[in-house]
Amino acid sequence: MTSAPVVVHRLSLSGGRRVSVHWHGRDEILGTAYSDHDLVVFLEAAGIADAEFVLDDPRWVEWRDGLAHEWSAA
């Protein structure tokens, strides 16, 4: 288990990755991101300031089952 509040889940077969945030003691799904831009939009909507600067910070974002910034199914 991670202590990062944001989780970018594994790549789906059709592309894109589900994004969730842990806050107020529970997990909330923010949506499916298909790009770094989508992820930044989700994080900004969740109240994370300067979201583009936390994408590679493991204290903020955990990238699960795949490479960071990988969005397309092979």
Image (cartoon, grey):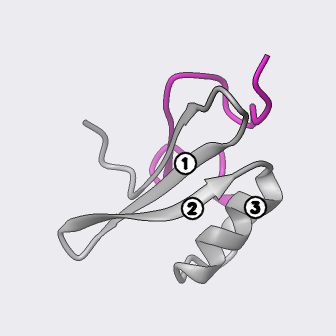
Q: Secondary structure at mark 2?
A: strand
| 8 sits to left or right of 26 | right
Disc 2 versus disc 3: nearer the observer: 2
| 18 sits to left or right of 69 | left
Q: Quadrant of residue 68?
A: top right
Q: Is residue 63 magenta?
A: yes
Q: Residue 53 in the image: x percent, y percent? A: 71, 60
Q: Measure how far apart labels 3 and 1 are at the Cα level.
A: 11 Å
Which numbered disc covers residue 38?
3
Is 2 located above or below residue 20 in the figure?
above
Label 2, on which residue?
A: 31
Is 10 located above or below residue 41 in the figure?
above
- Amino acid type shown at disc 1: Arg
Which numbered disc covers residue 18?
1
Specify the segment rendered in magenta.
53-74
Q: Residues within 10 Å of mark 3 (few under 14, many from 20)?
A: some
Q: Residue 66 in the image: x percent, y percent? A: 60, 22
